[in-house]
Amino acid sequence: MEYVLNDDEIKKVVQKNDAYYSLIELNDVLYLNNKLYKKIECLQNLNNLKALYLNNNALERICGLDSCVNLVALYLNSNRISKIENLSSLKKLRILNLEDNYINVIENLENLCYLEDLNLSSNCLGDKGCCMVSLLENNKCLTILNLSNNKIEEDILDNLSNLKNLNILYIMNNPGLSKYKNYRKLFVHTLKNLTFLDYKPITNEERR
């Protein structure tokens, strides 16, 4: 049996939970995680939705979200997604969590002008995928980036240096970091606006 997320399915979820408004369009947050959904059909009546939790399902594609034009936070972590796509209509999006998927290329994020927090940890990002990191410089609001637990082997620092507003970076557990004698020192020196690196605050002493 294929579990499909559609308008009828959302209606069932809303009717079973007293925390939701019975009219779907009145809800600004929906928790649809841990449902084993494999596919999203075109969703309607979600114009007012601001936060959508679709984590821990079995989704293979990002699709069907075009009507969610006011979405601010989208959680798609722990699915089976292999491509970043079909997000161009979500122009107000600030938080995008794609942790623990099968993504190998950073792409199709240029229209998300207000994106602040991007989580791509525990994916399949390698050299090819991360050569596109520099394109994130168009996302002027991006302050938090998580690329930890991937397969990045190349020198990614040059690409990250284009992200002028980056404050918090998670890059640990990538094979390419072994090339540096002290990657933390180098990253802190190069990325002037960082305040946190790999779960540790950057001290004044490290800045010297």
Image (cartoon, helix red, strand yellow):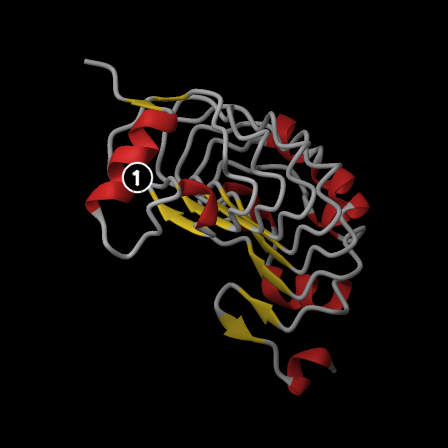
In the figure, is residue 100 to the left or right of 199? left
Q: Residue at x 54, y 24 (%)?
A: 83
In which quadrant of the rendered image does the C terminus lie?
bottom right
Q: Residue at x 32, y 22 (%)?
A: 38
Q: Residues within 10 Å of mark 1 (few under 14, many from 20)?
A: some
Does residue 90 sit above or below 194 in this rendering? above
Front-most of residues 48 and 131: 48
In the figure, is residue 153 to the left or right of 204? left
Front-most of residues 65 and 120: 65
Front-most of residues 109 and 170: 109
Q: Quadrant of residue 153?
A: top right
Q: Position of residue 40 (x, y in %)?
A: 41, 23
Q: For the image shown, how many numbered marks are present on the structure?
A: 1
Q: Quadrant of residue 189?
A: bottom right
Q: Residue furthest bottom?
A: 204
Q: Residue at x 43, y 39 (%)?
A: 76
Q: Position of residue 187 (x, y in %)?
A: 68, 61
Q: Which residue is mark 1?
A: 56
For label 1, the SS is loop
Q: Residue furthest front?
A: 23
Q: Residue at x 46, y 49 (%)?
A: 26
Q: Position of residue 67 (x, y in %)?
A: 58, 32
Does residue 172 sit above or below 15 in this rendering? below
Front-most of residues 8 and 112: 8
